[in-house]
Image: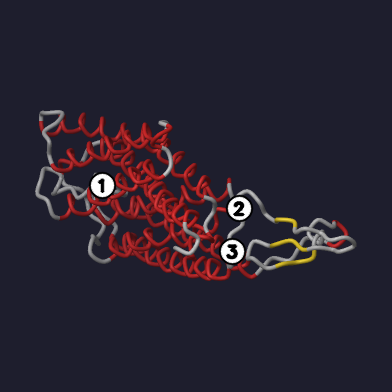
Amino acid sequence: MVVDQQLGQFGDLLFGSALAVYILAMILHAVEHALLRRAPEADAVAVPAIVGAGGMGTTEASDGTESPAGLAEDSDAGPAPLSRAERFGRMGVSLTVLGFGLHLAMLVVRGFAAQRAPWGNMYEFTAAISLVAVGAWLVVLHRRPEMRRLGMFVLLPVIVLMFMAGTVLYAQAAPVVPALRSYWLAVHVSAAVIASGILLLAGVASSLYLARSAHEDAPHRLGWAARLPAADVLDRVAYRATALAFPIWTFAVITGAIWAEAAWGRYWGWDPKETTAFIAWVVYAGYLHARSTAGWRGRRAAVVNVVGFAVMVFNLFFVNLVVTGLHSYAGVG
C-alpha cells in the first residue's frame, strides 16, 4: 500500500488550521461570556419590565443591557440592533463552522493519503472524536441558538484534545498494522468515535449543570455560572446526548467483541481496554436509569454522567498510552 506523504502533510496543515480557528472561536465566545452581565432564562429572549402609568418601560437584552420597551417589537422600527455580546458570539459560531469544515477536510485528506479509514492511530482517533464533538455541538446550536453561551466550554476540551493529538500523539500517515487491516476498523472504531464525541458534549453539559444548579442554590457562589442557560436546559441537553450516544457505544462494545473473536480467537478476555469500555457502558447505563428515576434526577444523575465522562477520558489516554494490553499496539478504540 502506497502512502501519499505529501497529501498527508497537507492534512496536517488542515489540522493545524482547524485548531487555530477553534482557538479564535473560543476567544470570541469567552468575550461574549464576559460581556454578559446576567443570563436570562434559557427560553426567554427579552423580559418586559413593569410599565408605569404613562411610562414607556424597558426590556432587557441578552447581554443584560436595557432598551426601551416595545422597540424590538415595533415592525416600523426594524429589527433591534445586536448587542456586543451577541455580535462576538455569532462571530464565534461562524469561526466554529469554518473550523469544522477544515477539520472534516483534514480527516478526508488523511484517509486518501493513507488509503484507509482515517482513525488508525491515536492522532487520527482523537481528531475524529473532536470532530464529532464539534459537529454535535453545532447541531444543538442549530436547534437552540441560546445555547451559544456554552461555546467556550465546549471548545475548550476539544482544543485540549487536538493540541495533545498534534503534539504528543502525532503520527505520520502510514498503513495500519496487519491485525487492523479489517473492515471492522471502519465499523467498530467509527462507532466508538461517534459515541465518544457525543458523550464529550454530554459530559460538558452535565458539568455545567452542576455549576449552574450550585449557583441557583447559593447566588453568591460561582458568579460566572449565572451566565449559563437554565439548569433544566443543560440537564435536557446532557440526557438527550447520552441517550443518543449510549446505543452507539453499546454497538461499539459488541462489534469490538466480534472483532476480538476474529483476531484473537475469543470474544472477551478482560483486556484493560475491554474492561474500561465495559465500565463506561455500566456507568452510562446507570446514568440513564438514574435520570428516569425520580429520586435520582438532577445533581445525582449529573454526577454519574460526569463520572462516565471521566472514565471515557481515562480509557482514551491512560489505557491507550500507559497500560499494556492487546490494544496497546493499535492505539485506537
Q: Amino acid at mark 1?
A: Val
Q: Amino acid at mark 2?
A: Glu
Residue 137 higher or lower than 275, as above or below: below
**What number is the disc on residue 311?**
1
Q: Nearer the viewer, mark 3 or mark 1?
A: 3
Q: Position of residue 244 (x, y in %)?
A: 42, 36
Q: Residue at x 52, y 60 (%)?
A: 226
Say which residue label 2 marks.
41
Q: Residue at x 48, y 51 (%)?
A: 137
Q: What secondary structure is marked by label 1?
A: helix
Q: Residue at x 31, y 32 (%)?
A: 250
Q: What secondary structure is marked by label 3?
A: loop
Q: Amino acid at mark 3?
A: Arg
Q: Nearer the viewer, residue 219 or 235?
A: 219
Residue contact between numbered discs 3 and 2, judged by CB atoms under 8 Å: no
Q: Quadrant of the C terminus?
A: top left
Residue 76 higher or lower than 314, as above or below: below
How far apart are labels 3 and 2 at the CA level?
10 Å
Taking the image as shown, residue 120 lies to the left or right of residue 19, namely left
Q: Nearer the viewer, residue 218 or 39?
A: 218
Q: Position of residue 305 (x, y in %)?
A: 35, 44
Q: Position of residue 57 (x, y in %)?
A: 80, 63
Taking the image as shown, residue 249 lies to the left or right of residue 70, namely left
Q: Nearer the viewer, mark 1 or mark 2?
A: 2
Say which residue label 3 marks.
38
Q: Nearer the viewer, residue 9 or 23?
A: 23
Q: Nearer the viewer, residue 51 or 208?
A: 51
Residue contact between numbered discs 3 and 1, judged by CB atoms under 8 Å: no
User: Sequence-wise, which precedes: disc 1 or disc 2?
Assistant: 2
Q: What secondary structure is marked by label 2?
A: loop
Which residue ends up furthest to the right in the rendered image?
54
